[in-house]
Image (tube, rainbow, N blue to C red):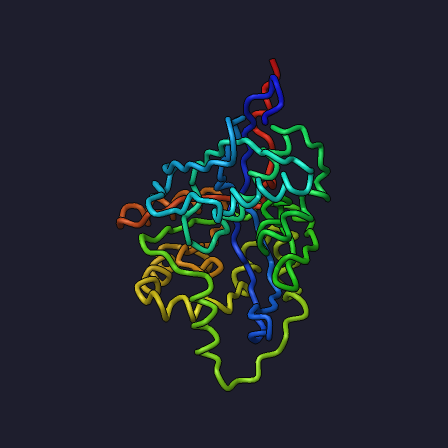
Amino acid sequence: MSIPGIHTASVSAPGKINVFLQVGPLRKDGYHSVASVYLAVSLLEDVRATAGQSGITVAVEGGGPLRIPVDGIPLGPDNLVARAAAELAHRTGRRDPAVDLLITKRVPVAGGMGGGSADAAAALLACNSLWGTGLSHTELASIASGLGADVPFALAGGAAVGLGVGDQLTPLDAEASLHWVLVASSIGLSTPGVYRRLDELRAGRNIPEPAAADPRVLEAVRSGNAAALAGVIHNDLQAAALSLAPQLAPVLDRGRELGALAGIVSGSGPTLAFLAGGAAAAADLESALRAEGHNALAVHGPARGAEVTAPADIT
């Protein structure tokens, strides 16, 4: 049952780029340890939580500058947003959670930018506001860690090092913005599938467990030094993603030819992220890529984590 007088709450949460990603060998539990440097960027997901009649419902709408299609997104109880709301209700003793959740997708679906994790983080914060449960950021982060490795970072935002399966976060104090151009793809790549392909490509090799992120990457992100970062960004999943989607390789090459300092597959892909020398260079690169038919968008980071954009209305 909803709280009388409280009707709706809206929250935004950012997508992310992995500016560094080292992946360890397959573990016995089926996961991989990683050393990752996350950067939240200014492409935001929105979740609106509205007091419902009974149960948890999920709806989704697409759009935004990248014109993200949303056909085929499962909207049942296994949707990460529904799971986030259900877990918050369970943790706070709410026996009959009644909430309608509307996701506005702007981050590419199955695109390697943590859009689903951003939705889950936004849903946690929106329901916390809607239901008046009053959980702290630390308590919400504890719930987030059980939902997925990227959810705690979407909640926190900014820049951070992720160890373990990516959920052991150490914030980075980034002093200046870095500017990027994203190129969304019409295909999707399954994150588990990309990891499986990586294991196949590395079969028989002795792969070390990642213990720390490259300190050169950390310094470049802290200082906002795009030129320095361009020489050290790295993604172990890139070879696997390009193996599964070889049509991405010419786009990576073309972005560099058009002026990008560096290009990288974002996470498990297929979204590509091109590092630019500044805001003007990013705008020029976006225009050049769009002129050639690519679905491109200039963004910057670090961006703030999940935040309430419209607090719960009380009448």
Residue nearest the observer in this picture, 92 or 265: 92
Q: Up-down: is 258 above or below 287? A: below
- 172 relative position to 241: left or right: right
- 6 relative position to 259: left or right: right
Residue nearest the observer in this picture, 73 or 236: 73
| Residue at (31% x, 63% y) in the render | 250
| Residue at (63% x, 48% y) in the render | 144
Counting from the top left corner in percent of width and height, residue 87 is at 61, 44
Quarter of the figure that contains the C terminus: top right
Counting from the top left corner in percent of width and height, residue 133 is at 69, 32
Q: Up-down: is 85 above or below 226? A: above
Residue nearest the observer in this picture, 309 or 128: 128
| Residue at (63% x, 66% y) in the render | 214
Residue closest to the far top: 315
Q: Up-down: is 299 above or below 3? A: below
Q: How many tags in the picture? A: 0
Q: Quadrant of residue 311?
A: top right
Q: In which quarter of the image is residue 193?
A: bottom left
Counting from the top left corner in percent of width and height, residue 232 is at 55, 65
Counting from the top left corner in percent of width and height, residue 143 is at 65, 47
- 48 relative position to 5: left or right: left
| Residue at (55% x, 44% y) in the render | 120
Q: Quadrant of residue 111?
A: bottom left
Quarter of the figure that contains the N terminus: top right
